[in-house]
Amino acid sequence: MIFHRFYPSYSTPLTHQPLLIFKHLKAQVHVFTANTLVLNKQSISSITSISSIMTNDNPPGGTIAEPFPIFLVANRYMLYDVNVVSYIRRVYHMCGCLIGTLPQVPQQNVFLGLPLELMIEEAALLVEKGVAYIVDDVAAHKTGREAMLEQDRLRYLAQRGEDLKALAEENHREAFARKVAALEKKGRMDLIVGTQNPPRVKEKENEATPTPPSSEEPNTSGAGPELLPVEPEKAENTLFSQPQPSTEYAPSQDVTFHSTPTTSHSTYHFPTTNPPTTPAHLIPQPSPTRFPIYRHLHSKGYFLSPGLRFGAQYMAYPGDPLRFHSHFVVNGLGWNEEISVMDIVGGGRLGTGVKKAWMVGGRDPSWEVGGNGGEGDGVRVFSVEWGGF
Amino acid sequence: MPNAASHPEHVLSLVSIVHKNLEHQADWSELSIHSTPNLPRPLISGVPSEAIYIDREWVLPVDLREKWTVRQWAEVFDSIPAEPPVPRSADDGPDDEPGGRLVMAMVSGDSTVVYYIVHDGIVKPRQN
């Protein structure tokens, strides 16, 4: 099951593409640049920086058509479209967990990418609100493929091949640029191979590099080596005026392999029912002791995320987790579920130790709408802190 | 101690331990024990040596070996006014609005007493 967490493609047609995820990583690293990488307008969703996910203005994709699909794979609720991911974060205060990672860096866990896994409570609440529906991903793929017309299939495959070739070339070009930059830094431009172009001087790029007197105007366009005679004793300082091999990218003939896209054609994984609904057997069934407090806090505007890191069920943030520390570590209990007083001591001490309050709560089963409880949802919560003396 | 006979011996012992601890170790003042039929167990009210939030605080004594439930907290909070009444008027009914805050005193077998503040509802921690 651990394997599924990182490679959902092993049980789904939506295969995971390292290249795309890497691009997504780069987009995340440039948090404040709001760069948008539109990788493939046909079959691949535009992947945008995390900054547009976290902020409320100019959300990518704007409004998402509701209800939108949540894909169920091996009892996990997945979202593959970054537009939906940012939309539910902005509108429904749900962050889920990005779980996509690079196969070659399986241990990294800071900058994860698509897909996004939702907690079962999140999926349940979205379905309950009627804004999402659950799709059995494996079954939908099977029926979708069988229902596809042959000519549609061939056209789709041809288009996908072209898109992927373009993507692979772009990747190759970027790899070449990285290589040039790295060698330039080391002063080993002579090592650059694989270009058919005649050598020429590259324009000066790095403004921070100290410029020797002999190359006062090194960025004169097309300045050849004969214009900038190098004195032997200054040779080490005249890196950028040396004759250099071309840093122009030349398309290579050996760009023959490419990865599978993160998102396949819609007919592969969208149900054909109209209007889309969640089959009864797929309706998420979260724990009856946990879900009431989740829904209660969510209705008060809190963002809830998994709380295992603090030994609890949820962490409750007063706003987007990228902007706020959490205020509460939360545990949902049954109304008559017994906990040890020692657990209250431990929880209260833990919460105070991390500047939070430890919260427990549950739903009164005798509460009825408009009855003894009046307004509300029958959930009582209690916040515990260390007394300080 | 009013209505003392209506509570079991071990609960009264618990209340006594916490009362003494508050008085002599935590240096609280104006301590008073409240025991009315609507209260699940006797509560103590008093004024901390250094004010936690307001002047008077409710104190709920529990034994470390006890089990506790959400329902019990709800019952205690529903039976007390938000602020403890002044001493000598301990027979006030639950007519004031319920809720607020109390200090839970956990009594261990080795005579240690620890205190945790429990709020009724979503209350932001003091440190945050």
Image (cartoon, grey):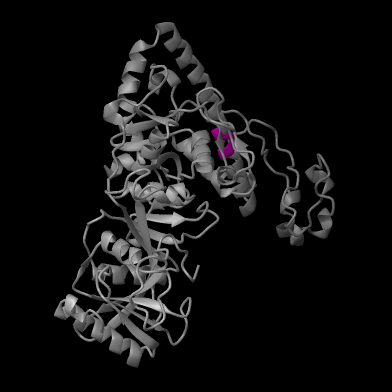
Q: Is residue A18 above or below residue A340?
A: above
Residue A199 falls in image quadrant? top right
- Left or right: where does residue A275 sit relative to residue A225? left
- The N terminus of chain B lies in quadrant: bottom left
* Residue depicted at x 81% and y 44%: A226
Is residue A174 rendered magenta in the image? Answer: yes
* Residue depicted at x 42% and y 40%: A116
Depth check: give the residue in front, A175 or A260.
A260
- Left or right: where does residue A158 sit relative to residue A184? left
x, y percent for residue B97 = 42, 63
Is residue A338 rendered magenta in the image? Answer: no
Depth check: give the residue in front, A109 or A116.
A116
Kindly tell me whether residue A119 is visible in this rendering.
no
x, y percent for residue B46 = 39, 83
Main structural element of the magenta stretch: helix, strand or loop?
Answer: helix
* Residue depicted at x 36% and y 16%: A144
Task: Find the residue positioned furthest to the bottom.
Answer: B24
Task: Find the residue positioned furthest to the left.
Answer: B9
x, y percent for residue A82 = 50, 36
Which residues fall within the magenta stretch?
Answer: A171-175
x, y percent for residue A113 = 46, 42
Residue A12 falls in image quadrant? top left
Depth check: give the residue in front, A217 or A33.
A33
Depth check: give the residue in front, A33 or A358.
A358
- Left or right: where does residue A219 sit relative to residue A40? right
- Left or right: where does residue A246 sit relative to residue B50? right
Q: In this view, does A282 lie above or below A302?
A: above
